[in-house]
Amino acid sequence: MLSVYEKVDALDKRAIEELFLSEDILMENAAMALERAVLQNASLGAKVIILCGSGDNGGDGYALARRLVGRFKTLVFEMKLAKSPMCQLQQERAKKAGVVIKTWEEKNEDLECDVLIDCVVGSNFKGELEPFLNFESLSQKARFKIACDIPSGIDSKGRVDKRAFKADLTISMGAIKSCLLSDRAKDYIGELKVGHLGVFNPIYEIPTDTFLLEKSDLKLPLRDKKNAHKGDYGHAHVLLGKHSGAGLLSALSALSFGSGVVSVQALECEITSNNKPLELVFCENFPNFLSAFALGMGLENIPKDFNKWLELAPCVLDAGVFYHKEVLQALEKEVILTPHPKEFLSLLKLVGINISMLELLDNKLEIARDFSQKYPKVVLLLKGANTLIAHQGRTFINNLGSVALAKAGSGDVLAGLIVSLLAQNYTPLDAAINASLAHALASLEFKNNYALTPLDLIEKIKRL
């Protein structure tokens, strides 16, 4: 997993003061990271246009232009007058190297090019973009678009201006910034990479409580013992609500992800031992011996024995439970909560926090982190375009999921994956992280992004 920071000013300052890396060295390495991206995505001789702003982001662009000129048809547009000392210095260096630099007012051609690089605003964006910085129209004729550090038009909270630069590739300089991982930013980031600034990541970075999950972090429930039986892999119990299909999807998902036994119990529906799926065990009552349970999928009312069940095993709470005050009993227990934003707002209201959906989306990372600190036994998995998993103040972000998951039943499958891992003795945090990764990666295996069904998703999970 990769470290994530709201800002990297402190990291740059440390690199300069403790590692004796000057601003010039850091900027040269940023330009090299952009240069590698150009070389990987365009042939020599291709047309490259670089849009430069007035600060150090613009300085990165001018340094890049100097490195490309002579190998590519390189053109720089000075979108704003160079103001920062390093931007001015890099602009002069680029001029000396023969880079063609035009002011935006001198533009007498369209921006048709092989590669368009945004080095205009970067991390200093606030408010709204100036009207002439309409990146949607500016970038229409670019074959491939690269953002330096942060696409112009995205602020430090991940809020996005409607005219923001929409990149195919974003190179975050030094380390990953949290604003690049907001739900709103997801359509503007493209592929996300880190541009190293002259030292290996662990040397450049300082401790953080926020992390970006990677494919390599997935630990599947592979069985390494040959002398084993079903009891070695846990008993996961799923309680079925009024809309029984949701819970049944969870149960089938749990069985497909390694649980030795998966049982179901009908609370508000007509599922019986005669009409349940053959591979599932039916229980008339809550079992005396189990490893973990899941409740909430398709549920309308909280069962009267809910509090008693919380004492018996760790659990996953989903969907319907977040609209009932009884869920507050679970906040002091070892539970995993898996709400989507609307359900989370309901839960927050129950604990006395009244905010709007807009406030939640603008501050999702901070709110999830604060909630996890207030309730340290709880693992919160907050769904979205990028999933957040928060526990005791640490937050793990999963940005690997596909839009194919935006379909009824996908969350039920996720709940089943989590309870399955809980039953197999994963810690609650590890169960949430690994189930979320498996869920996301399985969605990427489907041929298109519109036809995935929950049962398809379960089949893909079997093949991970």
Image (spheres, helix red, strand yellow):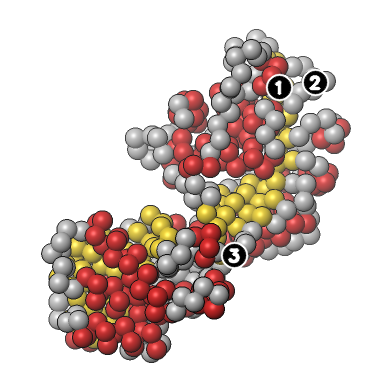
Say above or below: 69 vs 354: below
Q: Position of residue 102 (x, y in %)?
A: 21, 84
Give me the C-alpha separation between circle 1 and circle 2.
8 Å
Above or below residue 32? Residue 261 is above
Using the image as rendered, state which of residue 83 and residue 314 is in the foreground.
83
Say which amino acid is labelled 2: Phe
Residue lying at 64% horizontally and 59% vertically, measured from the top left: 209
Q: Height in image: 17 above or below 411?
A: below
Q: Disc 2 on helix, strand or loop? A: loop
Indicate the amino acid at tag 3: Ile
Q: Which residue in the structure is indicated by mark 2?
A: 289
180 sits left or right of 416 in the view:
left
Residue furthest top in the image: 274
Judging by the rendered image, the residue that carries numbered circle 1 is: 235
Where in the figure is residue 177, as x and y percent of width and height?
51, 64
- Crowding at mark 3 (Cα within 10 Å: few <14, some 14-19, many 20+): few
Q: Secondary structure at mark 3?
A: loop
Neighbourhood count class around disc 2 (C-alpha, 10 Å): few under 14, some 14–19, many 20 upward: few
Residue at coordinates 81% horizontally, 42% vertically from top-left?
333
What residue type is disc 1 on? His
- Disc 3 marks which residue? 206
Residue 302 in sight: yes
Q: Nearer the viewer, mark 3 or mark 1?
A: 3
Query: Can residue 262 be seen by looking at this rendering?
Result: no
Asked whether disc 3 touches disc 1, contact meaning CB atoms under 8 Å apart, the reply is no
| Disc 1, SS | strand
Q: Residue 124: image x %, image y %?
A: 47, 78
**85 up-or-down from 138: above or below:** below
Sequence-wise, the earlier of marks 2 and 3 is 3
Q: Are marks 1 and 2 in contact (CB under 8 Å)?
A: yes
| The disc label shown at residue 334, or none | none
Q: Residue at image x 80%, y 20%? A: 289
